[in-house]
Amino acid sequence: MNRPHRDAGSHPVGWALAAVLGWVLLILAVRAGVHGVVGGPVRDREAVALRSPTASDRGAGTSIRGRVFVEVGPSPEDLAPAPSCVVRVRDRASGRTVATGRCDPQGAYEVRATFDPRAVLVEIEVPGRLRALLDPIGDRLDDGGGVVRLRDVALGVAVEVYGRVLDPAGRPVADAVVEARPMPDLGEPLPWRIEADAGGRFAFTTLPAGPVALSARSRGYAGVELVAWAPDDDVVLVMDPLVRVEGRVRAPPEAQPSGQVVVRLAGASVWPPREVRAGADGRFSFEGVPGPWFALDARAAGPSGAWAAAPVDVDAADGAVPPVELRLEPAGALTVRVTDPAGRAVAGAYVSVRRGPLDALPRRARTDATGEVRLDALAAGAVEVAAHADGLLAAAPVPAKVVAGATRTVTVRLGAPGVLEGRVVDGAGRPVAGAEIVLRPDGIHAAAGAATALDVARIATAPATARLPVGSTPPPPVPAGGGFADARGVTAGDGTFRWVGLAPGRYTAWAVGPTGEVSEVQPVVIRGARTVRVVFVLTAGHPLRGRILDPNLRPVDGARLLLDHGLTAVSDATGTVAAGSFRGVVTGWVIADGYAPQRLRIPVEEDTEFEVVLEAADARLEVRVRGGNDRPVDGAHVRLSSQRPEPERSAATDLRGIVVFDGLARGPYAVEVDAPGYARWRGAVELVEPETFVEVALSPAVAVEVAVADAVSGRSVEGARVELRSADEAHVATTSSDGRARFEALAAPPEHVRVTAPGYVPSRLAVDGRGAGILHVTLERAGALEGVVVDDVGDPVAGARVEVRRDEGGTVATSTTDRVGRFRFDALPEGAVEVVAAPPATRPDLAPGTRRSDVLADRTTRGVDLRLERR
């Protein structure tokens, strides 16, 4: 927003005419552009000079001149000279300031310096006003005699952000360079930049209101980034010092490593792991390691086998790290076998072995063509094994134990995905090609990877999933788009679609036609590996349009409209969003960075327009975590989630046991806290005030081991499913090759144990809340029994209730016959049984029937047919 340059020569009449013409042009320019640049919907991030191609782009300059105005009233024409300003000529590439100047009381400035106009930018700041960033090439009016005359600018109102840069101990980081960029970034060539003073304090006084990304850097410290909400007067940027880590690997004489010892380091700010080789004397070092915490381990090969050093956690928050000592001990190995639900080998599956959820140094590998992979040189102790593969569902981590000098086998069985298929037709029943199918798991934060792949013939759109590579081994697919797990696909030429890789659960699905027609929303239930078939019928609707505004009634660019009945739409620079055509009541969400998600319910009648005013996400939550003796817990992992469409947030506590979440919406949140040695804590918090404080007291974790064995042979049972239950929670694990399932972080001792395994009778055990230790469970081999229920003339009886009873009394199992009268019981205990069949309510003419039979271990008793006579 600029006043045009006025220079009419020396003739009095010409000067007067030129002055009048200049003011006319100014008013026209203000009416056309000032409002849009400083305070309007198109661009309010900073004042930008209006341009016209008037000057040469060549030649060095010796002086830069211009004038600065500020808004002083509600009208765009209400301008006054800036009483003061700071002008900086900054290098375009590095941002370094090469010359500075100031405005006089009339807002005029001149900066004398020799410069290449193509290599610099001119930054103008007035406290409390939006920054201007001018280009000496595109924003110049003339450059006679080396003087570059820039267009005048008028600056709108800005807000302020004050803060401090500290180290983890609370000491100021002097001279740290702090940069700021408004969000979303509108392509400013240079960020706002300032140096913190000796007390670590900094201030930005020329920012636009809204979210702003702050970053800080300083020699000897790791860079830090934070998103704040402007205005803010208490931003704290904590910089972790870069430290030198040195130590020594010690090995017993019998180890005699045949090769060099490899030392690994990884942590909160270090991934993938860094590796060095220890010297002949076992010494090693890492330079420039960021904190606040990390871990180290080591491994080596020797003539007597592999050796490994268990991970050592290091706290580097105070910037001083004592020498680290790693001790090599005899290592073990794991052979991990990955299978599909039918027990077939899965080649190319991704496998990870870790010591717990917070392990910074997991081992990773991929299975070969036989579905197996061997991981050598593992430190002895309890671990958990996880696996995932394309097209299959990841299973819960399998507890295992690494034994020195031994190789144990662990089997991970992946889940079976479901299939959704169907077609899209119009109101006349004709197939619709190119219709978009939208699938959303019920609940905003559905499991990652719920929709992993589309298998549509001649498909044109990939599913909305993303992979975040970590090192050389990618993790399972995760939803894209701010925490939503929506997936989308397009129908083939005959209107059909097929969706594979779906996790069991409830979904919502609908179709949107190529020209905006929509179908009704249909609930979809996926059970195991079954195929669900649906038909979507498209109908014409009415256009739905709206505007998204901020709390100051300014348009919000880039807001997302997520409708339960149709497409996701995004607002433009004027805040306008066109959602498509609908009929009836439309519901959904409006979400935008820096604002609270807002729920919508809009009755669509004829052409419908709506307006949404968002609320700022300006709430702040401070969580303090304390452990034994009321001491703060450093490095606890705190997760914050909501049922609204906003991504989960997580962070680790500092040395004070505190973590702070800024920029939150008002409303309910779920909080989870994990820390080594403590049980997981879960709770809820309602954010009502601008600042909320929550104190969490962690309880020591309870460790339980369940050993499962065959009741006759005494051999360990691998692959048994063990479920522990207490008053308010349940935990599930699978036994490893030693028949043991390990639970490391229970909040309370279990009260009940249930164990199931293929070919065995399920076992239930009440343990009366016993504490940590080993629980022994024996399983009896099971048999099966099957038959048919018919009536007095031999016709099958569907829906009959069948019970299996033991001679000593009590019902063992119950079932219902299918449409041809068949029934089957698995996992029955061995011995004599009585089978009782009762007719369904639709056959009151039939009397119950009974039959005796035997159940044999590891066999199926067939032909246990029952005939129901008439009453």
Image (cartoon, grey):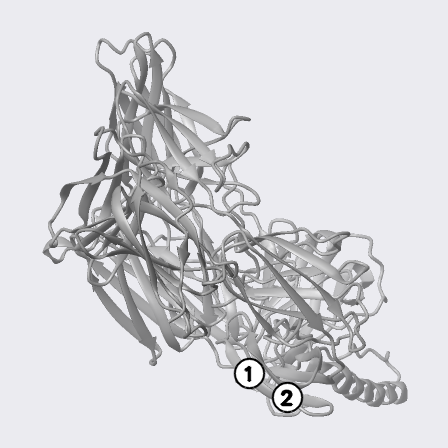
Secondary structure beneath dot 2 equals strand
- Residue 349 percent across, percent down from the top left: 51, 35
Instruction: Give neighbour class at mark 2: few <14, some 14-19, many 20+ (Cα, 10 Å).
Output: some
Residue 573 vs residue 664: left or right?
right
Instruction: State the residue in front, 833 or 528.
Output: 833
Residue 328 visible in the shown view:
no
Residue type beneath disc 2: Phe
Any mark on residue 610, and which? Answer: 2
Relative to 153, does residue 419 appear above or below in the rendering?
above
Q: Decide which of tag 1 and tag 2 comes sooner along the chain.
A: 1
The label shown at residue 105 is none
What residue is at 87 percent from the left and 89 percent from the top? 17
- Is 18 placed left or right of 535 in the picture? right
Report the residue at 34% width, 81% height from top: 688
Q: What residue type is labelled 1?
A: Leu
Residue 712 is left or right of residue 463, and the answer is left
Tags 1 and 2 touching, CB below 8 Å: yes
What is the number of the mark on residue 600? 1
Q: Depth-wise, is mark 1 or mark 2 nearer the camera? A: 1
